[in-house]
């Protein structure tokens, strides 16, 4: 089976998965205890007000008709408007406001987990039963065991009193001045001029602020360390185990017997094969991190998609909840398909059959 045929087959099989996920979302949202009408009219709203709002929102229609309308809107990417959080504002506009913050946080969280967790795990696996191995393994267990909400509070407390712990250095005034809690500035790059070629607009002028970029990284870094800590510890432990299993395999022993240099053995045989069990870990954790953490975003004041989804669910903003769930479902399915492709790239023994 060719790669493209396999891709389209997986793409076709993902359709019922998305439909099932949307159906479960509709059932939970529509039949749950949350009443969006009560959230809109308030505790003093009368029956007449409730009736008018139900009719305007289409909640007085039969449940099967609401289901069909919901499915058609989601599958045609008609995400609708917010009912409660910002009435009348389109869901696309809310996503454009909140999603960049979560993506920026998730990017640095994934980068920290990969760039620290995997190298430490591989180093521990290449040097088993040494002090470095024990220290890295113990550190991975500790990082994996610390709850996000607890670690976030501890980091905030330490950074607030950073002058006591870092020999007089203040985190807020280090490099560029910033607050510990707040949204990272994402306007470090912008397009100033556009030109139109036919019906396509192409940016020709770019504004870039290096100081704003540094401020944005510094603002999001404590939250990224907290959010990526569990993934970092998990990848380190699994990476160590994968290296130990790979380095004792027959083909590595054969490569040693042939007289290959240790560097060639590590990079060509051990490293690539040890990455195979890490693929599902990295891809699944990437979705979790990019999806954001409600607790971490609230504690650090990031206010991304995790915070938006939590507020929409609590306040009964049904279109917003359904749209966010639809986006999350599509992301999960896409990441799973990408994971299968990465398997075949890293391990030729895995076939498309």
Image (cartoon, rainbow, N blue to C red):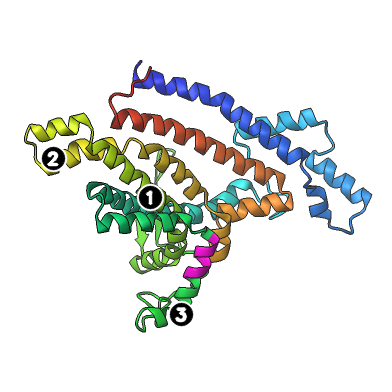
**Residue occupied by mark 1:** 203
Secondary element at image label 2: helix
Query: Closest to the observer: 270 or 36?
Result: 270
Q: Which residues are magenta?
A: 149-155
Sequence-first tag of 2 and 1: 1
Query: Closest to the observer: 315 or 235?
Result: 235
Relative placement, left or right, of 266 versus 18 is left
Q: Is residue 61 magenta?
A: no
Secondary element at image label 1: strand
Give how far across and how far down residue 250 sits, in percent.
Answer: 20, 29
Quarter of the C terminus within the rendering: top left
7, above or below 287, in the image = above
Q: Residues within 10 Å of mark 3 (few under 14, many from 20)?
A: some
56, above or below 1, in the image = below
- Main SS class of the magenta portion in the image: helix
Relative placement, left or right, of 126 versus 63 is left
Query: Closest to the observer: 249 or 275?
Result: 249
The answer to whether residue 36 is visible is: yes
Relative placement, left or right, of 199 versus 14 is left
**Residue occupied by mark 2:** 264
Residue under the image location 64 percent in, 48 percent down: 90
């Amino acid at each position: 089976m060719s790669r493209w045929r396999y891709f389209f087959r997986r793409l076709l099989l993902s359709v019922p998965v998305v439909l099932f996920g949307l159906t479960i979302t509709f059932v939970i949202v529509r039949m749950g205890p949350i009443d969006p009408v009560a959230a809109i009219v308030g505790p003093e709203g009368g029956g007449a007000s409730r009736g008018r709002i139900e009719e305007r929102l289409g909640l007085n229609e039969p449940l099967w008709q609401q289901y069909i309308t919901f499915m058609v809107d989601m599958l045609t990417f008609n995400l609708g408007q917010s009912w409660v959080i910002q009435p009348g504002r389109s869901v696309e506009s809310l996503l454009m406001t909140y999603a960049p913050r979560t993506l920026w946080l998730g990017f640095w969280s994934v980068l920290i987990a990969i760039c620290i967790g995997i190298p430490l795990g591989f180093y521990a696996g290449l040097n088993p039963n040494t002090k470095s191995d024990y220290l890295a393994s113990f550190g991975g267990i500790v990082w994996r065991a610390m709850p996000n909400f607890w670690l976030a509070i501890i980091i905030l407390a330490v950074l607030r009193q950073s002058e006591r712990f870092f020999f007089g250095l203040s985190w807020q005034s280090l490099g560029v001045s910033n607050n510990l809690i707040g949204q990272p500035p994402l306007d470090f790059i912008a397009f100033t001029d556009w030109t139109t070629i036919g019906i396509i607009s192409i940016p020709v002028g770019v504004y870039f602020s290096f100081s704003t970029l540094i401020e944005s990284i510094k603002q999001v870094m404590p939250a990224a360390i907290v959010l990526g800590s569990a993934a970092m510890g998990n990848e380190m432990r699994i990476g160590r185990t994968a290296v130990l299993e790979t380095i004792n395999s027959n083909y590595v022993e054969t490569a040693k017997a042939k007289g290959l240099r240790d560097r060639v053995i590590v990079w060509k045989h051990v490293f690539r094969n040890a990455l195979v069990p890490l693929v599902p870990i990295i891809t699944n954790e990437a979705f979790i991190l990019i999806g954001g953490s409600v607790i971490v975003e609230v504690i650090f004041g990031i206010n991304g998609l995790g915070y938006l989804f939590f507020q929409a669910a609590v306040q009964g903003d049904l279109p917003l909840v359904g749209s966010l769930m639809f986006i999350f479902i599509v992301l999960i399915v896409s990441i799973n398909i990408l994971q299968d492709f990465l398997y075949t790239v890293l391990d030729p023994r895995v076939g498309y059959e």
